[in-house]
Image: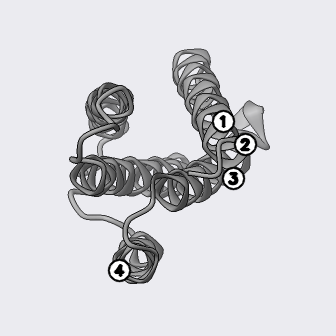
Amino acid sequence: MKAMENEKLIDVLNDLIRINNDRIQGYAKATEELNKPGYDNARPMFLERTHESRVFVNELSSAVGRLGGEPAENTTASGKLYRTWMDLKTAFTGGSAKSVFELCEFGEDAALKAYDEALEDETVWSEEIFNMLTRQRQMIREAHDAIKRYRDQLKAANV
């Protein structure tokens, strides 16, 4: 029973690893899209989110290892679709900063949903893993809110 339980927990943690790998690639793409004059203040925020996601992947991978599993190294299928959509949308909008921020907010919404689903039944997690997931989710929420504020500023400025 314990091995099957650990297998389910490992699967959930590996999904969160994939989501964070999506964040890494998504923010790298956003940084690339906003590599233009006038958007210098946005790039550090995206680079910080990329670093944050790498830290999360390391923490999640350690937890998977402690549970006896192999950490995921890939991204999600939906993340690949998201990045393709970002490529298409930025091609059609001329890579407007507002559209890049909208797409980043969409990605953060997906990450928050994945964390919410993982945290639904807190009784399955050790206190250590539950606290890690809760902290990571809070940091993603803060990133989401910062991106949304920035997007709203761009919207108000008609950029």
Q: Earlier in the sequence, mark 2 or mark 3?
A: 3
Residue 91's tag is 4
**Amino acid type indicated by mark 2:** Ala
Q: Residue at x 62, y 37 (%)?
A: 144
Distance of mark 3 from mark 4, alpha carbons? 28 Å
Distance of mark 2 from mark 1, alpha carbons? 5 Å
Closer to us: mark 3 or mark 1?
1
Q: Is residue 102 above or below residue 142?
A: below
> Which of these two is toward me, 18 or 120?
18
Residue 126 visible to the viewer: yes
Residue marked by disc 1: 153
> Which of these two is toward me, 112 or 150?
150
Residue marked by disc 3: 113
CB contact under 8 Å: marks 2 and 3: no
Residue marked by disc 2: 156
**Amino acid type indicated by mark 4:** Ala
**Amino acid type indicated by mark 1:** Gln
